[in-house]
Image: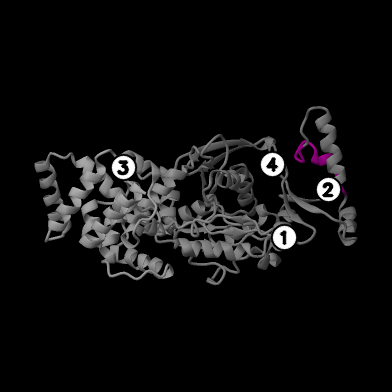
Amino acid sequence: MNTSSAVRVRFAPSPTGPLHIGGLRTALYNYLFAKKHQGTFILRIEDTDQTRFVPKAETYIKESLKWCGIDYDEGPGKEGSYGPYKQSERKALYKEYIEKLIASGWAYYAFDTPDELDKLRNEAEAQKQKFMYNHATRSTLQNSLTLSKEKVTEKLQNQEKYVVRFKTPQARILCLKDQIRGEIQVDTNTLDDKILFKSDGMPTYHLANIVDDHLMQITHVIRGEEWLPSLALHVLLYEAFGWQAPEFAHLPLILKPVGKGKLSKRDGDKLGFPVFPLQWIDADNKVSMGYREEGFYPEAVLNFMALLGWNPGTEKEVFSLEELITSFDLNRVNKSGAKFDPEKNKWFQQQHIQQKSTQELSQHLKTLLETKNIQTDLNISHVVSLVKERLIFTDDLWQQSHFFFETPTIYDAKAVKKVWKTDTVKVLDLLIQQLELVTDFTAENTAQEIKSWAKTAEIGLGKIMMPLRVALVGSLSGPDVFEICALIGKENSIARIKNFVTYKNV
């Protein structure tokens, strides 16, 4: 891999809708590669297709990158020496380059109407063939290769609609190099003459992409697998201009969790997980889930995305962004697609929430209590330390700790059925008597005294602990029961046991 010159990479999305996580992963890999090599990460908005342009999509893309912590060095709002960074603002310069290709014989004007081309396609289909505008057909069509110079000039002066097509060389075997896939051979006779420029003055993706990458001095093009079929044309365009091509790396697809094919928004809607970094509301006010709004940490999302198609070569799975930068290597990106696993996605979130400080999570719990108008003298940090390992999202704090702040009034029916035996009332009455005798009501001391009593009284611990947990929590979940007792206090603990007994006897 050539990294002798300063590395410059770009993420170049089209603002046609929300940023899919596949696009987010492409941005992440570009960012990691740039930072690993002390290079520059550029955001370029490719908005040449005005028919599909969605006004709020560009803002969404920038907000998504910001939320994730993927900061671009150059781009809209961060003008460097190679701007502007929106293709619609670079429109004037593409005309110059298409004229160079026409003058050098690498491109030509084509005046064929859509109806004429549709007719040719239909005729080819009728004969079970496929029509291609290329070396085999261009000599019979309406273009500057077949028309006289005078006729071409006349058509242009009359402002007839046209496109400019690339003149693909005939009978050449291209040996293309990809950092991930190795060498790829392409026969130019299988390629068509792609449209590079339209009479409305706007370039197609292919021309604008190559010109911009050259002018912005892009050294490595890291993009999705869907652009692999365009690689031959892009390499030929660099040859046509006499420019040195960057190195290319085409990333594997992110696949559906179930079935075959590329992960789509429909998969997320069907299975209930986000495929966009932020919530998206479309023109019909239909809401699509976002990782941010669902409670995911951006660092967890990036960790999960990074390992969808790349592996560090070790058993390590949990990475900070800084660790990803240090470890990332294009040579360890897989060729095959990576299956999206929603449960693994949550696992990464859980791993990252465990790395949050108790102080930070305590502040979040305090905020939740304030929204519920709950005032408490309990040690919030201690509560958090007891439930932290059960958290996936910060909003789970209330679900996992509510019983510390509210006495149960409803008990899980399955739990009650499981723990309530014929002698449970007697056992709980004896337990109350023992708890009243405990003077040092710390978790450790209370546990020791109750276990000692149970052993002496020959009462199985299960007969005590399970109904006690239901009495304190309302279910069979939660942290150590004696930790709960110590935090809520002796009086409250005994009151909850009595409430449970009363509940069962009603």
Taking the magenta stretch, the answer to whether it contains residue 110 is: no
Residue 325 drawn above or below residue 131: below
Where in the figure is residue 417, as x and y percent of width and height? 35, 40
The residue under the point 63% across, 57% down is: 17
Q: Residue at x 19, y 42 (%)?
A: 461
For marks 4 and 1, the one nearer the N-term is 1
Magenta range is 132-147
Image position, residue 459 (x, y; %): 16, 40
In the drawing, what numbered circle is on residue 315? 3
Residue at the disc numbered 4: 169
Q: CA distance from mark 2 to mark 3?
A: 59 Å
Residue beneath disc 1: 50
- Where 356 falls versus 180 (above or below)? below
Element under disc 1: helix
Q: Counting other residues with Cα less than 10 Å from the Cα at mark 1, is it few (<14), some (14-19), or many (20 or more)? A: few
Residue occupying the point 86% across, 59% down? 156
